[in-house]
Amino acid sequence: MVINPKGTAAWLIENTSLTFEQIADFCHLHYMEIEAIANDEVLVQPVNPIENHQLTRDEITRCESNENTILTMTTFMKDLTKSTKKKKYKPIAKRNLIPCAILYLIIKYPELLDKHIIKLVGTTQSTVTKIRDRSYKGIASITPKDPVLAGFCTNADIQEYLNELQ
């Protein structure tokens, strides 16, 4: 994922001898958009992809020498874009099942660590600790429910953590 694709394309057009196809491919823009930027039909502030750590000068030089090569983003940027992980939204109806799922995991798999239960159910450390030591509010009314059936995780996820412990 390129930061400011049109600005990056404008900088590459002005400062390199890359083909429009190479720039369009790297910036994930249509060839016609690159042409419009080059013909000043679209006013865009150029953004230096080298300063943003998206490209290296060596990579640009490599692709300038052969128009059939494709620009490759730096591994720094690839790692940066991979690590962004969104939290899944839990409907209100499912939130009420979280304590039930935690209790089920504690009873059925006592060897699971708190950090595993937190990841499987999507809860906090304090909730798991309170249910484990029976100080959770309304602990008497909580009935164990399988987190797989509730849709919090899969059996494979549980087995992965159990195998990790062995």
Image (cartoon, rainbow, N blue to C red):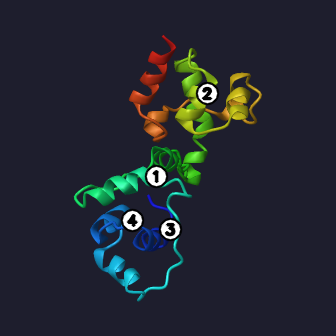
At label 4, counting other C-alpha atoms closer than 10 Å, the crowd grade (few under 14, some 14-19, many 20 or more) is many
Using the rendered view, name the quadrant where residue 116 is placed.
top right
**Which residue in the protein does label 2 denote?**
115
Compare marks 4 and 2 and give the one earlier in the sequence: 4
**4 vs 2, front mark:** 4
Residue 46 shows in this picture: yes
User: Any mark on residue 4, and which?
Assistant: 3
Which kind of residue does numbered mark 1 sit on? Thr
User: Any mark on residue 136, and which?
Assistant: none
Left or right for 32, reference 147:
left
- For label 4, the SS is helix
Where residue 75 appears, as percent x and y from the top left, is 45, 44
Circle 1/circle 3 CB separation < 8 Å = no
Residue 103 shows in this picture: no
- For label 2, the SS is helix
Q: CA distance from mark 4 to mark 1?
A: 15 Å
**Which residue in the protein does label 1 denote?**
56
Q: CA distance from mark 1 to mark 3?
A: 17 Å
Where residue 158 appears, as percent x and y from the top left, is 46, 26
- For label 3, the SS is loop
Which kind of residue does numbered mark 3 sit on? Asn
At label 3, counting other C-alpha atoms closer than 10 Å, the crowd grade (few under 14, some 14-19, many 20 or more) is some
Which kind of residue does numbered mark 4 sit on? Cys
Using the rendered view, name the quadrant where residue 156 is placed.
top left
User: Any mark on residue 27, and which?
Assistant: 4
Compare marks 4 and 1 and give the one earlier in the sequence: 4
At label 1, counting other C-alpha atoms closer than 10 Å, the crowd grade (few under 14, some 14-19, many 20 or more) is some
